[in-house]
Amino acid sequence: MAHPSGKYANFETLREEAVTLRRAGLSRRQIRDRLRIHNNDILNRLLQGEPPPDWTRRPRAKDDLRARARELRLQGWTYDRIQVELGCSKSSISLWVRDLPKPERRDPTEQAKLAVRKRWDHELAVRDEQRQQTKAAAASEIGAMTDRELFMAGVALYWAEGTKDKPYARRENVIFVNSDPGVIRVYLEWLDLLDVTPDRLRFRVMIHETADVAAAEQYWSALVGIDASALQLTTLKKHNPRTVRKNIGDSYRGCLVVRVLKGADLYRRIEGWWSGMVVEATRRTA
């Protein structure tokens, strides 16, 4: 296209042509070549105010961050909160959301409470991570357990949690009660080590009457590897309306009672083993 009265004489006519091409979806390079305009300043003036077509826009790495920042701003977040959440500079956030309405100012006391809560949540997360690391490290220190180690652990476990004979009430029975599934597993392994056969074991659930009794029976029977119908009659603890119970929720399953039939001789040996452990433990410091 020629420009008879000077290279860019009729600017308005040229601008109309450039705008028409722009709105038809042409790029700057295509318009430049079509109109034979090689001066960027003139081209900028001709296309002033005309946005580029979508196909010429390159995706930017921060587009997702920008969209998220705008979403949070619309939810009433401050620049500081958005910065912490997204890890962006406040100047970028300001540029991205400057056309959005400012959130209502909160009560300073409410803001202080939110800040304290956020710091405390972070502190709790750090503490929990440290707690889990300590537990994992301690668990790895145990290693393989020998039969003698299991034997000693079982004796101590029974004497701490099992029923005991009293001078005023001779009950040489082997009865163990606990609510911790891990303790029950170790105890049953110990009985197996002592050659106590499964046919000598009887199981019974003890639980508060307001709990999910059926679920508890199913849980404990599955843990010890028997059918729920093989459990003895469940013992229900009566509800006291003046008592505020804390052992509630899905994790509450009551206790499991494990009884060994014909256990008088085993009980006497357990008591003897424990007495020997006490003697040997105190002898170490004598």
Image (tube, rainbow, N blue to C red):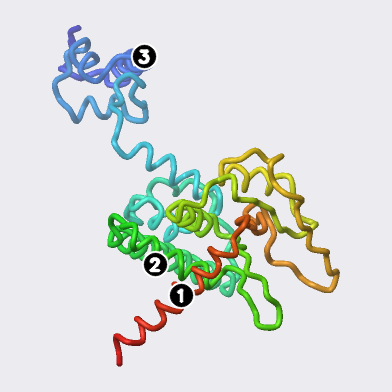
User: Nearest the camera: 75 or 27?
Assistant: 75
Q: Quadrant of the N terminus?
A: top left
Secondary structure beneath label 3 = helix
- Counting the numbered discs, the total is 3
Q: Is residue 52 left or right of residue 275?
A: left
Sequence-earlier tag: 2 or 3: 3
Secondary structure beneath label 2 = helix
Local packing at callout 3 (Cα closer than 10 Å; few below 14, some 14-19, many 20+) is some
Decide: is 188 above or below 13.
Answer: below
Q: Which residue is mark 2?
A: 152
Q: Position of residue 270 (x, y in %)?
A: 50, 69
Decide: is 197 above or below 4.
Answer: below
User: Nearest the camera: 179 or 226?
Assistant: 226
The disc placed on residue 274 is 1
Residue type, label 3: Thr
Q: Is residue 258 visible?
A: no
Local packing at callout 1 (Cα closer than 10 Å; few below 14, some 14-19, many 20+) is some
Q: Position of residue 180 (x, y in %)?
A: 55, 59
Find the distance from the CA under tag 1 to the CA under tag 3.
Answer: 99 Å
Which residue corresponds to the image point at 84% horizontal and 69% vertical from the top-left? 240
Find the distance from the CA under tag 1 to the CA under tag 2.
Answer: 9 Å
Q: Position of residue 212 (x, y in %)?
A: 74, 50
Q: Is residue 161 left or right of residue 13?
A: right
The disc placed on residue 76 is none
Q: Position of residue 247 (x, y in %)?
A: 68, 63
Residue type, label 2: Met
Sequence-earlier tag: 1 or 2: 2
The disc placed on residue 20 is 3
Camera-near label (2 vs 3) is 2
Which residue corresponds to the image point at 47% horizontal and 64% vertical from the top-left? 121
